[in-house]
């Protein structure tokens, strides 16, 4: 599944069950995926100029592997966050959009106002608003 949603206040979110679906047509969007937030997922994000990315923390995994990609994206200035695996089904972007609650944010996402406990729709709107502000400055 992959679908685009216009965000109130401008910008768009693209929901995709797997981050591997991200492509050039998603440039400038906030991508909400059902994928884990590991480094292999982050590499897909780095291939496109995205406003930000949302992943599933997948229970975080051994040595934080489920969210390790957030650090990689932070090193490239890309805001990224992950939702609790207990709040949204892994591999289900629609459930992530509707029910996801953030558990982890990188520094770039925190600078955009994202914080643990925030819902995904609010987070996507904040990322889009920050991107719009930066493009007009």
Image (spheres, grey):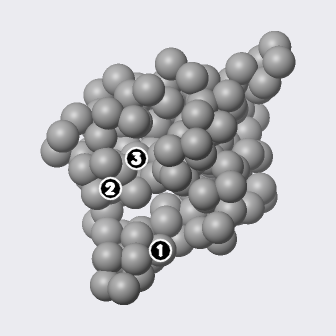
Q: Residue at x 67, y 43 (%)?
A: 83
Q: Is residue 107 left or right of residue 21?
A: right
Give the secondary structure at mark 3.
strand
Name the element at disc 2.
Answer: loop
Q: Which mark is residue 31?
A: 3
18 and 106: which one is in front? 106
Residue lying at 40% horizontally and 77% vertically, measured from the top left: 134
Labels 2 and 1: the sequence-earlier one: 2
Q: Which label is found at residue 29?
A: 2
Image: 96 above or below 35:
below
Q: Which mark is residue 130?
A: 1
Nearer the viewer's eye, disc 2 or disc 1?
1
Identify the image quadrant of residue 23. Answer: top left
Relative to 94, is 4 above or below?
Answer: below
Residue 12: x %, y % from top left: 31, 62
Q: Residue furthest left?
A: 25
Residue 22 coordinates in the image, percent (x, y): 29, 34
Badges 2 and 3: C-beta atoms under 8 Å apart?
A: yes
């Amino acid at each position: 599944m992959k679908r685009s949603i216009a965000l109130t206040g401008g910008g768009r979110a693209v929901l995709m069950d797997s981050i591997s679906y991200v492509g050039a047509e998603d440039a400038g969007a906030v991508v909400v995926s059902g994928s884990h937030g590991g480094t292999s997922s982050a590499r897909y994000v780095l291939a496109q100029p995205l406003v930000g990315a949302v992943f599933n923390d997948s229970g975080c995994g051994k040595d934080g592997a489920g969210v390790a990609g957030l650090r990689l994206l932070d090193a490239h200035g890309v805001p990224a966050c992950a939702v609790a695996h207990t709040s949204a089904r892994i591999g289900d972007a629609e459930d992530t959009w509707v029910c996801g609650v953030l558990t982890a944010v990188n520094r770039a996402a925190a600078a955009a106002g994202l914080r643990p406990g925030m819902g995904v729709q609010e987070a996507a709107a904040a990322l889009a608003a920050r991107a719009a502000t930066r493009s007009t400055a």
